Image (tube, rainbow, N blue to C red):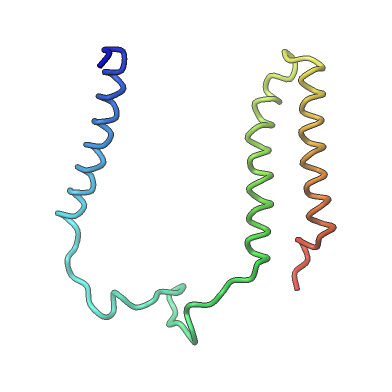
Amino acid sequence: MSTGYLPLVIFAAGGMLFALVVLATNWLFRPRHGGREKERTYECGLDTEGQTWIQFKIGYYLYALVFVVFDVETVFLFPWALTFKASGMVSFAEMAIFIAVLAMGIWYAWRKGAFEWN
């Protein structure tokens, strides 16, 4: 094996060893008492009523996906805003295209009724 990969192998082995040590320590020092009360379903401090395994509305997932898309957009927008003066008009045009594509996406979701709560 080439010595160029040795630091990588050592780093990976150290990471795996650290993870195993943390898991083993957790297993050794965890509280071992439990029981019927510990295994009950917990819902905001109240006893659950009715069936606990229910299917969620698709609206929750649609809102979550739209949030993730615009959260990722923010990740790309902040570094661009910090270097706006140094990057010039080409960077501005690229970011305008990026925001336009995202605007078309939200327009499409709006037209399909993704934001309607029925």
Residue 58: x %, y % from top left: 65, 67
Instruction: Name the quadrant containing residue 41.
Output: bottom left
Quadrant the C terminus occupies: bottom right
Quadrant the N terminus occupies: top left
Looking at this rendering, what residue extends furthest in the left direction?
Answer: 28
Please tell me whether residue 35 is drawn above or below residue 67 in the rendered image: below
Residue 93: x %, y % from top left: 82, 24
Left or right position of 71 against 21: right
Looking at this rendering, what residue extends furthest in the front direction?
Answer: 1
Instruction: Name the quadrant containing residue 63.
Output: bottom right
Please tell me whether residue 21 is drawn above or below residue 57 in the rendered image: above
**Which sits in the foreground, 108 or 41?**
108
Left or right position of 116 against 9: right
Residue 20: x %, y % from top left: 22, 43
Residue 30: x %, y % from top left: 19, 58
Please tell me whether residue 22 is drawn above or below residue 13 in the rendered image: below
Left or right position of 50 against 75: left
Q: In percent of the image, x 63 and y 56: which residue is there?
A: 64
Q: In percent of the image, x 78 and y 55: which residue is there?
A: 109
